[in-house]
Amino acid sequence: MTSPTLACFILLLLSAIATTTTTTTVTAFTVDLIHRDSPLSPFYDPSTTRFDRLRDAFLRSIARATRFPRASTIPTIESTVIPSSGEYLMNVSIGTPPVEVLGIADTGSDLIWTQCKPCKQCFNQNPPLFDPAHSSTYKTLPCQSSSCSNLEDATCATATESSSGSDTCQYSYRYGDRSFTRGSLALETFTIGSTTGRRVSLPKIVFGCGHENGGTFDESGSGLIGLGGGPLSFISQLTKAVNGGKFSYCLVPTSAKSDVTSKISFGTAGIVYGAGEVSTPLVSKEPNTFYYLTLEAISVGEKKLLYKSQSHKAVAGSEGNIIIDSGTTLTLLPPGFHNDVVTALEAAINAERVSDPRGVLSLCFKSKKDDIGVPVITAHFGGGADVKLGPLNTFARVEDDLVCFTMIPSDDVAILGNLAQINFLVGYDLEERTVSFKSTDCTKHH
């Protein structure tokens, strides 16, 4: 990778544009994750410096945090996500015969949708619009379906209102920046590629065929693919189609060569096991879109600091107090707790403390040396899962002579970001309700 940040990845599921699809039972498959700022990415801008791209990623982390729910409130899922912050693109094929569709893949929302013909209101997109009339496997869902009842905002279209000629579930999905999509909820076959070159066919995936869409969507995409934990997300639906309800990813260091890609695996290929693997419970909370863990403490070297909430009270036993998110770069902690960690790091690191000239990061040191003596930082999760974070996971060089701590204070929500997940095999088991970590050289993980 040429960029020094894991701010955004493009989940590149290379689609097969063909008239036939695989019909064998799928138990596992693995695909590539490509860094948003890699030369392989359609977002790559060679005119920006690696430091500029890193700063932009940090700012996206801060903006994204405001879209997650505060601990004291439970807003609707629709009000907590802004699609323009989507940190992945996902390339899939929809329908029979398959038509390529490019969508923002978002770990912070659930609904899968794409712009469809006939379009009453659409944003400009480079790929052609999906036309359900030309697919032999497209089928709208009735209002009485369980999928329709899983939507916050759905109505029933009559035969005269719906082009399908029968009662159809009409969805309406809004995002935090007033972007929106409205259309018909339907079933369709999704076809994706894998690292083995074999095409994988996933029949009867629930998605939204959007006839009215607008907001801050980029013309390189066609819609959005939700990777959250709710029942309509791509991950949850994949659980039914692929054995086990398991997925895992391995994020390569930013210093890796651009032809070395991160990987995400589904099904039995997504099981994390072996020496060094630790596991922590996945906490069920509302909204179920997000993946909640319990962070009990952080150790700086041998100094163990108990988790504190915003009120500065020790709440180490508070379940589900942090969200793990592969789409956020930085790790965000409650201000009082963050201050404890910073104070301990200041005492442990023998380097000149300076301010971040851009005011984004709270702990920076002036040094051109790669090794400034960062101690091992251990995140203690519930269930005895101790995850030892190295300097790569906790500090980043943001200028030639400036190294900064990549955990920041946030009143909104605590988030374990993707820099903290570099060189770990991170596995999600939605049946056992666990998240596992295993220290791994992700450049060699296949």
Image (cartoon, rainbow, N blue to C red):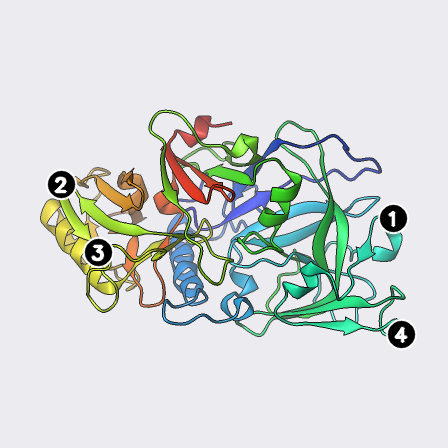
Q: Position of residue 433 (x, y in %)?
A: 46, 45
Question: Which residue bears the numbered disc 1?
Answer: 136
| Pointer 1 or 3: first along the chain | 1
Q: Left or right? Give the position of 337 relative to 66.
A: left
Residue at 55%, 63% in the rendered image: 84
Question: Which residue bears the numbered disc 4?
Answer: 160
In the image, 271 versus 216, the foreground residue is: 271
Residue 206 position by quadrant? bottom right
Measure the alpha-carbon separation of dots 2 and 3.
Answer: 20 Å
Question: Dot 1: what SS?
Answer: loop
Q: Position of residue 313 (x, y in %)?
A: 19, 64
**Is any atom of residue 254 visible in this view?**
no
In the image, 394 versus 142, the foreground residue is: 142
Measure the alpha-carbon separation of dots 1 and 4.
Answer: 22 Å
Measure the alpha-carbon separation of dots 1 and 3.
Answer: 57 Å
Identified by mark 3, the residue type is: Leu
Identified by mark 2, the residue type is: Glu
Residue at 63%, 63% in the rendered image: 150
Circle on res. 363:
3
Question: Dot 3: what SS?
Answer: loop
**Is any atom of residue 258 visible in this view?**
yes
